[in-house]
Image (tube, helix red, strand yellow):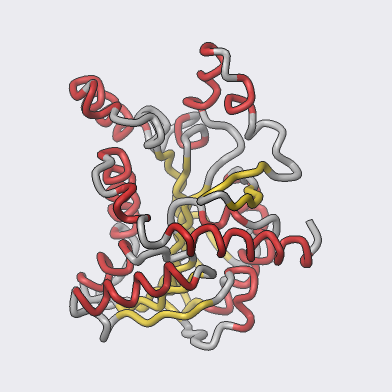
Amino acid sequence: MTPVADNINEQYAARAFSAQSNVFDDIYADNTIVKYKRDRVRAHVLQYINPNASILELNSGTGEDAIFFAGLGHAVHATDIAEGMQQQLREKAVRHRLDNLISTELCSFTQLDSLRNRGPYDYIFSNFAGLNCTGELDKVLLSLPGLLNKDGVATLVILPKFCLWESLLLFRGKFKPAIRRWFSKNGVKAHVEGTYFTCWYYNPSYIIKTVKGSFDLLSVEGLCTIVPPSYIEHFAEKYPRIYRWLKKLEGRYRLSWPWRFIGDYYIISLRKK
């Protein structure tokens, strides 16, 4: 994708998520599996982050994770391209009396060379596939080393090119959603609040290959590989015993092949060389 086209796509994504910002938290507040996903990602980060770290968050949204990490004493510089999301985040930081630890900046992750607050940071964090909204993920990845301190860590949560749960939709006759990731070289259309934009899918191997000269791989773990994705509404409530069993299985196998590669997401952490 050309830089101009990617910039236009980002403008559409910014418009979409700004429009959704006022209701974003309400949409997901009671979703048990969304809470499970957040808990898993945060537990993963807490393995690697040092006390009182400085964090650069990409695609920070309404600030749920910024609030969590600031509440633990970390300083978070939260960036996003959606002004509506940034406004929600700033208001939330004030309500939680954490505005002394949270700063914000309207900035695209493909334009980190123009970031005003360049750190360097101890940790870079990007949750829930915001980075899938660009066809220039390589550009983002190559900009990260210059923003990190020595031995700094980056944790990214990404949508891969194959999701076991989505592929099972073939058996329900839903062919298009079942195979949409398989043939996504040129991206797949998504829409939020009536605005369409393009998403791309990236396997862990792509990230590892792109950053191999600058980072060492710490770990890759699957997320919603065995536990169903959060868009399968009310699964946890309808089938609580099955849900608990699937959570237990995913906890056991999240780092194992092939489960770490075939979830709705994967969590990848890298340490700067």
Please identify the quarter of the rendering in which residue 76 is found: bottom left
Q: Position of residue 257 (x, y in %)?
A: 48, 31
| Residue reaching furthest to the front | 194
The residue located at (34%, 62%) in the rendering is 48
Q: Image height check: is 157 above or below 222?
A: below
17, 44: nearer the viewer: 17
The residue located at (28%, 30%) in the rendering is 234
Q: Position of residue 87 (x, y in %)?
A: 39, 74
Q: Position of residue 213 (x, y in %)?
A: 65, 64
231, 263: nearer the viewer: 231
**Image-based side of 155 in relation to 248, left or right:** right
Q: Image height check: is 94 above or below 7?
A: below
Image quarter of the N terminus = bottom right
Q: Image height check: is 59 above or below 120?
A: above
46, 111: nearer the viewer: 111
92, 204: nearer the viewer: 92
The residue located at (43%, 64%) in the rendering is 125
The residue located at (27%, 46%) in the rendering is 35
Q: How many circles with numbers are drawn on the protein?
A: 0
**Image-based side of 236 in relation to 136, left or right:** left
Q: Position of residue 23 (x, y in %)?
A: 35, 56
Please identify the quarter of the rendering in which residue 243 is found: top left
Image quarter of the C terminus = bottom right
Q: Image height check: is 77 above or below 227?
A: below
